[in-house]
Image (cartoon, rainbow, N blue to C red):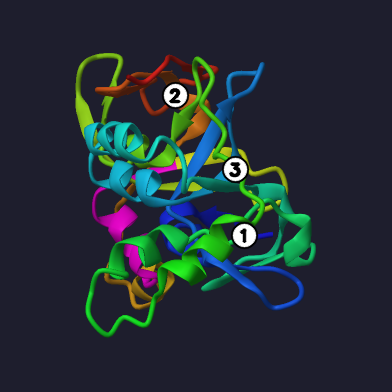
Amino acid sequence: MTDLLVMHDIVDGQLQSSDGRRLGRVADILCQRQDDGSLKAIALALGPEACLRRIASRFGRRAHRLFKGRFERSVEIGEVVEFGPTLRLREKADAYDVHDGDIWAAHVIRFVPGSGVSQASLDVADRGKAASAPAPRRGDVWVSDLIGTPVIDTGGREIGHVVELRIGRRHHRVNAILTGSYGWLGRLGIRTLVHRLGWWGRHEEVPWERVEEVRYDRITVQPRRASAGATVTEKR
């Protein structure tokens, strides 16, 4: 079973319930530290705070002060039964506490002349069921905070910056970090083609077993032939 790439296969994907209702687009993914040191994706987040957090963590914090989590929604990743441009969920829309993951955008564009969005329609939508995205516990991290983080080995050599994360389809654990050009090829979806044509020989893909520590400013890994259990420290 082929692993998933979080930025290529999940983030920005459209969530759709089994009865065909669109619930919004995935903006971020919450990962939780496991007892064995691994990192597991647990929830898909939607909303303006999640979107702005992808630009910079400080923007997400400012958005939280503004919106106070009003438009943040989440769905457990285990509810996804089919991955692709559309992420198909197991149950009908009424089974999820997500009345409209993108309703926040309608609140913004209602001020645009001709948008067709009325305050009355927004009031009806706002009366639907709502569930705030889960608050990270100490040691948990958002994927948006991992992307772009420098990766260095224990000797201080910089390997690159995180471009992609590979996770298992079944257990949703992070299996590897992709850096540099190889990571970008994965996000563009042309990695396999480039390999088949022989245009790409070397790449840097760091198995998660080599990760020693994750911090807000860097990820430290063991040298290539070494291995260690991962520990995750809180990102601020």
Observer-nearest of 60 and 84: 60
In this picture, residue 216 sits left or right of residue 132:
left
Q: Which residues are magenta?
A: 177-190
180 falls in the magenta region: yes
Residue at the spot x=57%, y=28% of the render? 32
Taking 162 as reference, is 137 left or right? right
Secondary structure of residue under mark 3: strand
Above/below status of 146 relative to 203: above
> Relative to 185, is 173 above or below?
above
Which residue does the numbered mark 3 point to in the structure image? 43
Q: What amino acid is at disc 1?
A: His
- Judged by depth in the image, the label closer to the viewer, 1 or 3, is 1
Q: Quadrant of the C terminus?
A: top left
* Residue type, numbered disc 3: Ala
Which residue is rendered at x = 36% and y = 50% of the image? Answer: 48
Q: Position of residue 6 (x, y in %)?
A: 47, 53
Real-space CA distance between mark 1 and mark 3, rounded to the nearest whole angstrom: 17 Å
Looking at the figure, which quarter contains the N terminus? Answer: bottom right
Q: Quadrant of residue 220?
A: top left
Q: Earlier in the sequence, mark 1 or mark 3?
A: 3
Q: Nearer the viewer, mark 2 or mark 3?
A: 3
Q: Residue furthest front?
A: 120
Q: Position of residue 51 (x, y in %)?
A: 34, 50
For marks 2 and 1 on the same chain, the one whose residue lies earlier in the sequence: 1
Q: Percent from the top left, x then y, of residue 157?
A: 19, 23
Using the image, determine if residue 192 lies above or below residue 174: below
* Residue 226: quarter of image: top left
Which residue does the numbered mark 2 point to in the structure image? 211
What label sits on residue 99 in the rendered view?
1
